[in-house]
Image (cartoon, coloured by chain):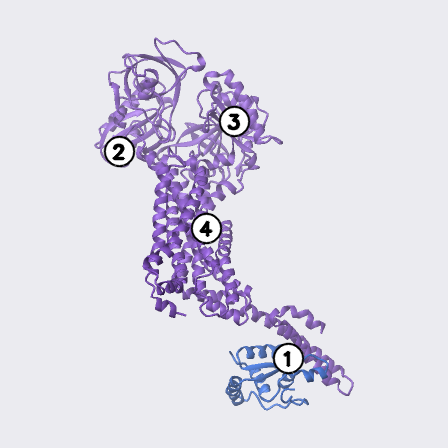
Amino acid sequence: MKITYSTTLVLEALARGYHYGFDIMDATNLPSGTVYPILRRLERENMVTSEWEADGVAQSEQRPPRRYYALTAEGQKVFEGTAERYRAAGAIAPRSARGLRPARGRG
Amino acid sequence: MALFRAIKVLVPSAIRHDWLREWEAEVRHRWTTVARGREVRWQDQADVVRRSTGAISDAAWLRQQFTADHDIMRDVHYAMRMLSRRPLISTLAVVVLAIGIGGTVAVFSVVDTLLLRELPYRDPERIVTLWLTQRDHPEDREGVAPGAFLDWHDRSKSFSHIAAASPESFDYFDGTEPETVIGARVTEGFFDALGVQPALGRLFVPREYTVFPSSVVVISHGAWQRMFAGDPAIVGRKVVLEGEPLEVVGVLPRWFHPSVLGRLRQEEVWVPGTLKNPEFANRRTRYWGSVARLAPGVDIDSARAELSIISEQLSREYPIVLGAMTATVVPFRDHLAGPIRDPLRVLLGAVLLVLLLGCANVASLLLSSAAARQREFAVRAAIGANRWRLVRQTLVESLVLSMLACLAGLAIARTAIDAFVVIGSTTVPQLSELALDGRLVVFALVTSALTSMLVALWPALRISRAALRDGLTEGSVSTTGSRDRRRVASALVIAEVALALVMLVTAGLLIRSFATLVRVDPGFVQSNVAVLQVFAYGDLYNTDGQRRTFVDRTLGQMRAISGVDKAAVVSAMPFIPANINIQGGIRIEGRPAPPEREQPVTSLTVASPDYFAAMSIPVRRGRLFTADDHPNAPQVAIINDLLADRFWPGESPLDQRITVNWQGRWRTMQVVGVVGRLRHDGLDRDPRPEVFIPFAQLPYGSMTFVVRTTTDAALLIAILKKQIWDVDPNLPLYDTSTIEALVAQSLAPRRFITSLLTVLAGLAFVLATIGIYGIVSFATSQRTREIGVRVAVGGSTRDILRLVFTEGAQRVAVGVLVGLAGSLAVTRVVATLLYQVSPNDPLTLGTTTALLAVVALLACYWPARRATRVDPLVALRSD
């Protein structure tokens, strides 16, 4: 799979602890129409796994459970490889989340 | 949320539910977060909406991925991989199906062109051709006598147009070699009956049908191209035919070759003919063609009924010439399809049988290879593939197979169609239009698709059911084999044997029939005879003396050529397409003349002395003609033994005096010899009674030079032509050939169908043998464990052999019975193609059945034999 710049940003967001689709959008500043296909592709290539959030939180918020994405070991490795390159090129700089706290653990 | 529900249909159904849940969860979560404890800002609302639109591209992406990954393409990809992993089986399957599909397409192209495709004529189903036939032999269509046509024309009410065409040939000289242009003189209504409009110019106007001789001509597209190089200013140009300048008034469309006269005549020019022609008094000589268009509201049956009433009237009015005759109405399409109509149906049936056999074989191949893949299917079922998924996989595999076969089949069809054009268009001119067009490609694709369904559905359903039922149970494959599978195997063996037997019997009958036919003695020796037909009429040939001089000089020149053994002329040349059959009444002196309606009729032939030697016709009694039978000598005749047996059974006709009616004049002659009988119209036609008159005493103009050579006759034709042109440089040669070629040509349609069916039957035989062998081997291999057990508990080799072989043999026996029953039904259809062989010919049935049974039993025996060598230890350990 070709690792594009956008893909690297998504990997980076995951590595930094953003695990839900909308949160990753916030962290990467990419539109949702880009983030989701990237997630799906990463998942297909076994760089990302996904699980459903535990029911308790969802029930308390009266909504369906969210989908929790996490890097696999493979994904971590790929991220480290490509992040190295992009960082060397100055393409990615540490980026702060804009006012949203990263989700921790599994809901 | 409504947005998600609207676009979720894009998402593949398997993950649709999860997808919807995920998006709803994200949006609701975001909503709760931003709304927490404060008023929702419009920017936040807009942000949520903007993000939600991403669901559209997400859904679209998923759909695209699914289509690429999971759907048919993936199946196809997988199928290709599976097929290339088993190259032998796959290639075999493709070849088998390709032959079946290619053959079907090729034969269908002929069926399509001749029987199905709309004819280019206007309302073609309303066009009929009319023929005189003997009441007892309505299938033997003869031409129409001009007088009979006039009577139909005047008395019938069923037709809006009824017209006749009389065969004409025109001398034409373009400056190189004199040639004969074939054409027809047609009466008013001819082009209306056919419903044709000219491509250029006009057709004849009513006034032109009343003028004789005519000064106008309509030409075919071919003649326009050939004689005038497609000159666009052709209309109004003059063409000199028979020395007369005729104005070309119109050119007919390219497709126009109606062949109402004879199927082999390639007519190029048409001139108008008047209904006041003196020939209309002639009700005897049947050489015209007639075509008519049914009047509005009249169907073919009422037209038939009307003509049959008119025929009965005519029989009463002209008992001598029309007493035994009736009118036969033949739809135009049937006329065009001509002699290959019936063979075509047989052929189509045969290729479909081969295709079915091919399907049976490929089905059994897939079945056995699928059984080997049972584990694979079971695994896939276990990890969640549903039944449809497995069935689809098998279907796609067979679809890929059959599409490959379709490609190869189209190549085969193309070759076959080219061959049909070359071989067939001499028999049926329409076949020259055959081409592999879009219609046929679509037909091939549909055939292939149906084939793949037929081939795969059974194995697919069986396998998937087994996979789901048996799961991964070890050894489930190799126990005794389910009853189900054995039923399939039985059915396949029976079908293969039965289909192959039907094909073999049909081909066997045709081969026997053909062999019988070529052994028929035509009454002459075929090898090394060249024939050149001329029509010596016109200013140079007005008198008997002129015609005699021409023939004598030409024969003299021909005899001087080395390699020429005998040279002669004859009016009625056997097997030549334009066979001149002059018939006339015959009386025997000293016998009471029979009543007029029982007046016997004979064929009358003019021949020069060497004719009998040139043709090697045997002399039975008396002598042949000599130079002494000159014009002033006593009038003599030779008769053939058929006539002799009829009038002088057991006596000698020599020195008897006979009187014959030669074109209206009675001539009395003394019989001086008896010769063998000749077949004129085909080896399958009866010889005709014939009276020969010496050319010297009756110098006739329509003659054929017959030359026996000591070398290959075909090589001498060019030199012989030159001898004729040395004497008359302007005389066209109507037809030149060798008698071998003429006889071969008369056999061509039969040879064509027989050889094709033989090839197909051979194919069917091989396919069936391979198929039976394959099925029995497979079935046996499925029972390895059972056999192993039997051997282990003391079963002898004989027992095992009997066990496996008996089962196969029983199936073969049933197949033979089914096949015999099928053959008896099918051969009725081919009965019309047979010559002196019964459709139930016991010899053919017996031989083919025996052949097939022996080979089929061998195909069962071999696997059985192998089964006896099963090592019980190996068999039982294998699981």
B38 versus B313 height, above or below:
below
Real-space Cα separation, disc 3 to disc 1, in angstroms: 85 Å
What residue type is disc 1 on?
Answer: Pro
B725 versus B432 height, above or below:
above
In the rendered image, which quarter is residue B285 located in? top left
Dot 2: chain letter: B
Identify the disc placed on residue B812: none
Lower sequence index among marks 3 and 4: 3
Residue mark closest to the camera, 4 vs 1: 4
Q: Find chain B in the image and tell me its colour.
A: purple
| Closest to the observer, B326 or B285 | B326
Real-space Cα separation, disc 4 to disc 2, in angstroms: 46 Å
Looking at the rendered structure, whether the residues under marks 4 and 2 are on a common chain is answered as: yes
Residue mark closest to the camera, 4 vs 2: 4
- Pointer 1: what residue? A31
Looking at the rendered structure, whether the residues under marks 3 and 1 are on a common chain is answered as: no
Identify the disc placed on residue B528: 2
Contact check, label 2 and label 1, Cβ < 8 Å = no
| Closest to the observer, B774 or B334 | B774
Question: In the image, what residue occupies the spot 47% across and 61% down?
Answer: B482
